[in-house]
Image (cartoon, helix red, strand yellow):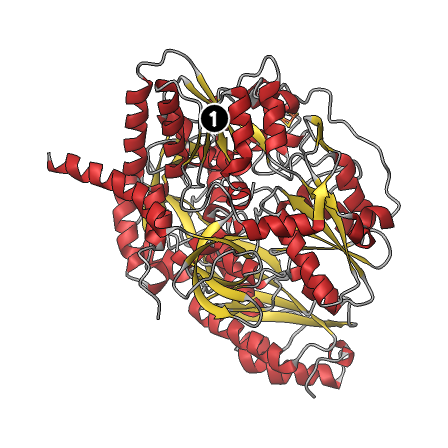
Amino acid sequence: MNKKSKLSFSLLLDDYRDSHIIKKIAERIDQSIAGIDRKIRIMEVCGGHTHIIAKYGLEQILPETIEFIHGPGCPVCIMPKERIDHAYIMSLEKDVILVSLGDMMRVPGSYGSLFDARAKGADIRFVYSPLDTLDIAKENPDKRIVFFAIGFETTTPMTAALIERQIKESLKNILYHINHVTVPEPMEVVVSEDDSNIDAFIAPSHVSVITGAKIYQPIVNKYKIPIVVSGFEPVDVMESVRMIVQQFADNRAELEIEYKRGVTTEGNIKAQKMIDKYFEKDDFFRWRGVGDIPQSSYRLRSEYSYLNAELIFDLPDNSIDDHKLCMCGDILKGKAKPFDCKAFGKTCTPGKPLGACMVSDEGSCAAYYRYGRFNKI
Amino acid sequence: MKEILLEHGGGGESTGKLINDIFLEAFSNETLNKLEDASPFFADGKMAMTTDSYTVNPVFFSGGNIGKLSICGTCNDLAMMGAKPGYISCGFIIEEGFGIDELKTIVKSMSEELKKNNAVIITGDTKVVPRGNADKIYINTTGVGEIVYDGLSSSGIGEGDMIVVSNSIGEHGAHIFVMREGINIKSDLKSDCRSLWPLVDLLIKAGIRIKAIRDATRGGLSAVLNEWARQSNVCIKLKEELIPVKREVKGICELLGFEPYHLACEGTFVMAVDREDADKAVEAMRSHEYGSNAAVIGTVDSEFISKAVLETGIGTKRILDIPAGVLLPRIC
Amino acid sequence: MCLAIPSKVIEIDHEMNSITVDTMGAARSASLDLLPEPVEIGDYVILHVGFAIRKVDEKSAIEVIDYYNEILADEQEE
Ligand code: SF4
């Protein structure tokens, strides 16, 4: 048998959510911030961090001079309507089963959401793991299975692993509509603008498990901005804020890893190789709320274009903008808060989202709506 | 004969046999056995009546089945009005080809649950529809019962009242979710599907001053408390650490990104009681196996009117939100 | 983005290159196709949409918590 692991759920989940430790870190932050008389605006890039901050109300125990800006890190939110329309159109094609992950089902495109397509008779399944698509393909040899792939670098290798298994098992009936996007490029977009408000980044947990912390080094070097790669629990987020504040106190701007139990500088090389084997960078991707960002997404390598649903189905090549009132672009860039939007909570709610940030539970408008509503309304 | 055929619903000989061998066998009582077109019964005082249709998929789950649910659900709706379940009607819509043994199991669970509520089925109906026109089996039940504790209302909750749950939350919702659509999670978790009248009866007998009481079914704890906060114009404030949640439910919530407060319960209720009675209510419920994890979970004040608010372990507050439509795993 | 949670390895299936993991009583199979390091039963891995993506590093996981717990314990003594 193996050596005894000192790890336990009580350590990994309970201790990393322990209220005494969280409060202790808050005290530490108060001490280090005492000498700094400026605002520190921290963008948490990842929607998961936005969720944790809202869920634990972390803003309420941090000094007022620390402000969180919620970044563009939710793959469901940043999906432009025209690509959801693609999913909708493909799902209603003859003999197609459309497969995607969780929340994607709810997001409305210009014709409706995938739930609406399902009500019209489309066969749409959601899976917990991309590999579950293999079973659907085997059980339905006469159908074309379209895997609507979403997610950042964290989820991209899983799509690659699915392709690899499909090829190994000679399954012919799975096609791919790829919407895998990458994190550093939008980070650079928001920080490079002249009127950028961002003083530091909390970098994503699980993207970084795959890519390694190294992907953020160029941004730190070029913009002299502190970046801390943080874990997913409240203690992680607090500790990352503390590390950022400490950098300001010491006048440093460095790349640091708080989430050492999961992230290394180099990352998961095996997963990176899988990505490279099947994907290459696309010229640009249109981010909902942000616009075109060059080199910020993946497409299938040309050897695998026979698996590319975008080439096989007849899909419109257009772009659809959000409602005029919607301020998502500014929110994603840290220039506005959800409360600044006139539509927030009135014509725009999670049930009927007008813009990107209200779409998924992890969008910043949705997080504010769910957890923070009583502050202002 | 192993399967239900169209002729079982046709009114002829097969229908008679089905009624006799399965339904009367299990539900037998003087009124039902007469098989009249309508069943007479005596009623005295203020009555409550409720109806619900059950279409749960999967039909069989761990901790119960659609039959158990159809009796629990309807009797619980009565109990939540302070009414003692009395008479029940039931209508079956069965898809052609449904297994007779499975039907027997369902009917047996119904009869066991009726006994726990001291209620009887006095009229019923069975229809069989062609294959594909229904998903296995649907059951509708209607219940009537005498109100023995009057004045319960979701608009009568006042500042100072306490919020109490009868047991740990979210088990039915979590269990049904993992049994469905390609999630492939294994768990020993059972549905909490159970009859609540025995517990309510205990509380009434203990003289607890109940203001409002509701089983936290669809939308879970958060749906009920949000509705109460709005209708009573108060702020309901829960302490997150006091809410009983089983470890297995927590695990499923971690995996899928759910909140236990959004998951349906089928045998757990929440109530608002007079401050002085809260501990006594918990004690009374803990004496019964269906209330083993009963707990006081919060208070009522006026800080954020019409809102249900959660206080976290670190003393921060957040809105207890209402789940948006269908629950979907938060994967990305 | 990317919900991922620590889970405990309770079974290893070498043929399928997969493991069964437990997350507080909920068990699910997970693929090893993307895991760079070998695992043993009892290890904790980070799980994302059905794939183990990393073994949880024991030393670093304990470090942060121990550091703060010690401070908290010292304060209690004072
Ligand atoms: S509230 Fe709605 S419309 Fe306003 S910025 Fe957010 S998503 Fe856009």
Classify mark 1: helix, strand or loop.
helix
Please give the name of the residue rendered at 33% of the width and 38% of the height, measured from the top-left corner: B313
User: Quarter holding the C terminus of chain B?
Assistant: top right
- Asked if one can make out residue B145 in the rendered structure from this viewpoint, the answer is no
Nearer the observer, B158 or B150: B158
Q: How many marks?
A: 1
Q: Quadrant of residue A250?
A: top left
Please give the name of the residue rendered at 83% of the width and 51% of the height, measured from the top-left corner: A92
Does residue A175 sit above or below A246 in this rendering? below
User: Quarter holding the N terminus of chain B?
Assistant: bottom right
Left or right, B89 with respect to B170, comes to right
Q: Position of residue B279 (x, y in %)?
A: 26, 47
Left or right, B31 with respect to A10, comes to right
Subunit under mark 1: A
What residue is shown with label 1?
Answer: A374
Q: Position of residue B48 (x, y in %)?
A: 52, 53
Which residue lies most toward the right here?
Answer: A314
Q: Position of residue B188 (x, y in %)?
A: 45, 67
Nearer the observer, B141 or A196: A196
Q: Amino acid at mark 1?
A: Phe
Please give the name of the residue rendered at 35% of the width and 14% of the height, measured from the top-left corner: A36
Q: Is mark 1 within 8 Å of ligand 1?
A: no
Nearer the observer, A148 or B11: A148
- Asked if one can make out residue A335 in the rendered structure from this viewpoint, the answer is yes
Ligand 1 rendered quadrant = top right
Please give the name of the residue rendered at 40% of the width and 26% of the height, measured from the top-left corner: A244
Nearer the observer, B93 or A11: A11
Instruction: Say few, some or many: other residues with alpha carbon within 10 Å of mark 1 (under 14 / 14 to 19 / 20 or more).
Output: some
Q: Position of residue A101 (x, y in %)?
A: 64, 50
